């Protein structure tokens, strides 16, 4: 009887472990309208996120927007990665539809700039209900404002799938 109980527990644990591993990359390659699921191996651990690239003439990527559940213990993190066209000494703003913009700061390396923010309760609601976000910044070359769109079509389903995975 004890052997049967141990065997049942072992099989159950094996099933749960296998199921969790198979769900981890379940979002990889899935498309949610304008968002896509992606997973990468980071130091031996699979990190999954949703991503939306912005292209110039459907060729060169000028900005990549990602949302992940890894960078912060409780809230999703939105990250915009773009080339060094952004002047990091100036304010960066993001807004959804006609809602109030939020002020952000950029951190730039020699090759790219990153802008992060937490999807708090307010911003999550705006992302879920909104149609389009806009990242606004001052360009380094022209010293004039640039506006990059972020489609929110499919965002709610993408986040649901990310949370399940």
Image (cartoon, helix red, strand yellow):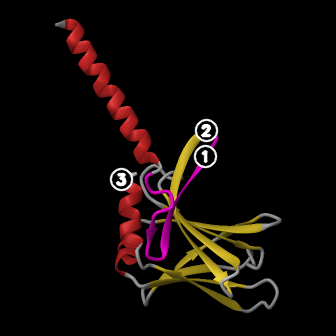
Q: Tell me the element at label 3.
A: helix
| SS at mark 2 in the image | loop
- Separation of marks 1 and 2 at Cα, in angstroms: 6 Å
Cα distance in 3D space between marks 2 and 3: 21 Å
For residue 138, above or below residue 125: below
Q: Position of residue 105 (x, y in %)?
A: 64, 71
Q: Classify residue 4 as left or right of residue 157.
A: left
Rendered view: 2 above or below 35: above
Quarter of the view holding residue 89: bottom right
Which residue does the numbered mark 1 point to in the structure image? Answer: 41
The residue sitting at 46% across, 63% down in the picture is 30
Q: Is residue 40 magenta?
A: yes
Circle on res. 44: 2
Confirm whether the magenta stretch covers residue 20: no
Extent of the magenta region: 26-44
- Residue 92 in percent (x, y) is at 63, 79
For the N terminus, which image quadrant?
top left
Tell me the number on the disc at residue 164: 3
Q: What residue is rendered at 75% in x and 68% in y?
A: 112
Of 121 and 30, which appears nearest the observer? 30
Mark 1 touching mark 2, by CB under 8 A?
yes
Question: Does the rendering let one see residue 143?
Answer: yes
Alpha-carbon neighbours of circle 2 within 10 Å: few (<14), some, or many (≥20)?
A: few
Mark 1 and mark 3 lie on one chain; the one further toward the N terminus is 1
Whole-percent x and y of residue 48? Answer: 51, 53
The residue under the point 28% across, 27% down is 12
Q: Is residue 92 above or below residue 5?
A: below
């Amino acid at each position: 009887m004890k052997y049967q109980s141990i065997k049942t527990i072992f099989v159950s644990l094996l099933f749960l472990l296998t199921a969790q591993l198979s769900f981890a990359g379940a979002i990889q390659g899935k498309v949610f309208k304008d968002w896509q699921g992606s997973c990468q191996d980071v130091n031996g651990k699979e990190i999954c996120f949703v991503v939306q690239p912005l292209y110039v003439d459907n060729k060169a990527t000028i900005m990549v927007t990602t949302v992940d559940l890894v960078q912060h213990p409780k809230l999703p993190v939105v990250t915009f990665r773009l080339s060094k066209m952004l002047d990091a000494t100036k304010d960066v703003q993001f807004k959804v539809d006609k809602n109030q913009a939020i002020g952000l700061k950029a951190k730039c390396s020699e090759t790219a700039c990153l802008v992060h923010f937490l999807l708090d309760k307010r911003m999550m609601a705006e992302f879920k209900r909104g149609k389009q976000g806009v990242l606004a910044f001052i360009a380094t070359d022209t010293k004039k404002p640039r506006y990059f769109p972020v489609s929110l079509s499919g965002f709610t389903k993408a986040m649901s799938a990310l949370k399940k995975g």
